[in-house]
Image (spheres, rainbow, N blue to C red):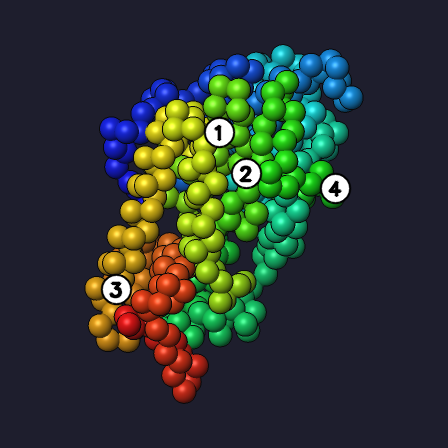
Amino acid sequence: MDLTTSREVELLTDAPPAPGELIEVASNLYWARLPLPIRLNHVNLWFMREDEGKEQGEGWLVVDAGLDAPSCRDAWEKLINGPLGGLPVRRLVLTHGHPDHVGLAGWLAERFDSTLHATRTEWLFAHWRRERQGRAFGRPMQRFLMSHGLSAEMVERFAAQDAAIERGEFPVPEQHIRLRHGESHEFGGHEFRVIVGSGHADEHASFFRPQGHVLVAGDQILQRITPVIGVFGHEPEGDPLSDYLGSLPRFEALPQGTLVLPSHGLPFHGLHARIEQLRAHHEARLAELLSHMREPKSGFALASLIFERAMQEGQGRFALAETLAHLHYGETIGIVRRLVQGDGEVRFVRV
């Protein structure tokens, strides 16, 4: 979902690096952008030079790896043969296990014998996604979708949409060095504190550098769009929106002048204002849903009302997932009630 940037959110620059270029945004912290062959057409990576004193020797640390797609590999080759100066990528640091972030981690680890640093849940989730690749929906997923109002034909259509997604995942490294919330690590000669949030991903890691007040935010705090927060079926009773909103105070504790480096969009100042925009977006989405719920409706019917364009553009599964996330959050705070029909179909109504 696109949100208008307020005057309180100020861009560091409106000129992202071209594929194969690095732009220094803070002391020893460089920005690269990889093009993605999907609707979300880019991902930002963050590089730091590591000195000769490191156990592995001189080289680079990079936060996230990009999708395993020709456009990303081409951009990586330009970086390796250009601004990286022939030095290897020694350490890969992962924000979370979605394919546009972890897809080329295994490729880089094999090429440079890099170590992978990640939260345990996101490392395991990346393995699970890779193992599930190419598999059809099983009976539990079919029942889940049909319980929320999809016909058998629509389930097949969602399955086809899911199969058509560019997975772009090279085999995930078989080892990782675990990151935990609250830990401090030295990256590129600077101290970074790990801030773990959830909602978009179960154990998403962001990294705050007290010196200069810099936040490598990943997908947890984005500049222009909202992170996808959805109930996709592998955890059918989940409440990821409560998890996401519950994570935001960890970022509000950071200084207002923090430079935010998101995985999509542009670097910006105005962290607290942006958090308020994100909260307001979810409040407005829930209010919009409630306006349609004077009578019980299925999740699919509600998603079709508020995400009509996404449904028409083949994004139905994301539309349903985000709708269910808001409905489940509404249940948690006591303003939505779930009704289960005799055939197992679920309806939601405002309280």
Of pointers 2 and 3, the one earlier in the residue sequence: 2
Kindly indicate whether the residue at mark 4 contacts the one at mark 2 (C-beta within 8 angstroms): no
Q: Residue at x 59, y 28 (%)?
A: 192
Kindly indicate whether the residue at mark 4 contacts the one at mark 3 (C-beta within 8 angstroms): no
Q: Residue at x 21, y 64 (%)?
A: 291
For marks 1 and 4, give the one nearer the viewer. 1
Q: In the rendered structure, which amino acid carries the disc numbered 3?
A: Leu
Q: Determine which residue is flagged by label 4.
A: 175
Q: Residue 19: give x, y in percent of width and height.
A: 48, 23
Q: Determine which residue is flagged by label 2.
A: 195
Q: Determine which residue is flagged by label 3.
A: 290
Kindly indicate whether the residue at mark 1 contacts the one at mark 2 (C-beta within 8 angstroms): yes
Q: Label 2 to label 4, Cα distance in Å? A: 22 Å
Of residues 216 and 111, the one drawn nearer to the viewer in this rendering: 216
Of pointers 3 and 1, the one earlier in the residue sequence: 1
Q: Residue at x 24, y 58 (%)?
A: 288
Q: Residue 120: give x, y in percent of width and height.
A: 66, 47
Q: Determine which residue is flagged by label 1.
A: 215
Horizontal arrangement in the rendering, residue 115 relative to residue 18 (left or right): right
Q: In the rendered structure, which amino acid carries the disc numbered 1?
A: Leu
Residue 270, placed above or below residue 307: above
